Amino acid sequence: MLALMSTDEWGDHDGAGDADGFERLWTPHRMAYIKGENKPTGSAPEDGCPFCRVPSLPDDEGLVVARGKNAFAVLNLYPYNSGHLMVCPYRHVADYAELDEGETIEIASLTQSAITALRSAFGAQGFNVGMNLGAVAGAGIAAHLHQHIVPRWGGDTNFMPVVGRTKVLPQMLGQTRELLAEHWPQP
């Protein structure tokens, strides 16, 4: 739930502070990410790994866009842009060098399909594709390898993320999943 409020509306409400002429876009759903909710408690699959749990859910509930034999594509719960996908092996493995040949090939193939679907569904003009291996490299869930595919458009970085540290996403995740599943290339 987002709420845009002017200083006239929030004033002293809930200790929001002194009126300063700024409008604020409140994004309380981001607090779950900041607090690390649903983050695994350890490195084993039974420690609450969401990438191990998601495949057992129905696609719409788990936000799974496509499934393969060795890997799957899923929407990021905390996306940088609309359509931000991740490709994950089913096997709980942390290091890219530990993937077997079938997993490596399928992760590459699903990444290609994701790019095709994002171009078709959203008209993406570019992509950031990559992995953060290990917590020191920025992996939020370091115990289960996942490759990010972030669609980009000319001018998609504006004052909101730069100054306001907030992304404005025009679509709910369930709608994004449906659209991408419709545009996913068939083998």
Image (cartoon, grey):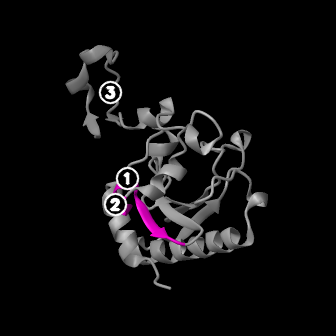
**Who is closer to the viewer here, 123 or 157?**
123
Q: Quadrant of residue 49?
A: top right
Q: Residue at x 58, y 33 (%)?
A: 41
What residue is disc 1 on? 169
Q: Where residue 29 sits: x, y (%)?
A: 37, 37
- Give whichever of 48, 126 is nearer the camera: 48
Q: Residue lying furthest right in this view?
A: 97
Quick one: label 2 or label 3, which is nearer the N terminus?
3
Q: Which residue is mark 3?
A: 21
The span from disc 2 to disc 3 (Cα, nearest Å) is 41 Å
Q: Is residue 4 left or right of residue 121?
A: left
| Closer mark to the observer between disc 2 and disc 3 | 2
Q: Which residue is mark 2?
A: 60
Mark 2 crowd level (few <14, some 14–19, many ≥20, 10 Å Cα): some
Magenta residue span: 58-68
Can residue 151 be seen here? The reply is no
Residue type, numbered disc 2 = Asp
Secondary structure of the residue carrying numbered label 2: helix
Compared with 37, 78 (above or below) is: below
Q: Residues within 10 Å of mark 1 (few under 14, many from 20)?
A: few
Q: Residue furthest bottom?
A: 187
Which residue is rendered at x = 52% and y = 43% of the image?
Answer: 162
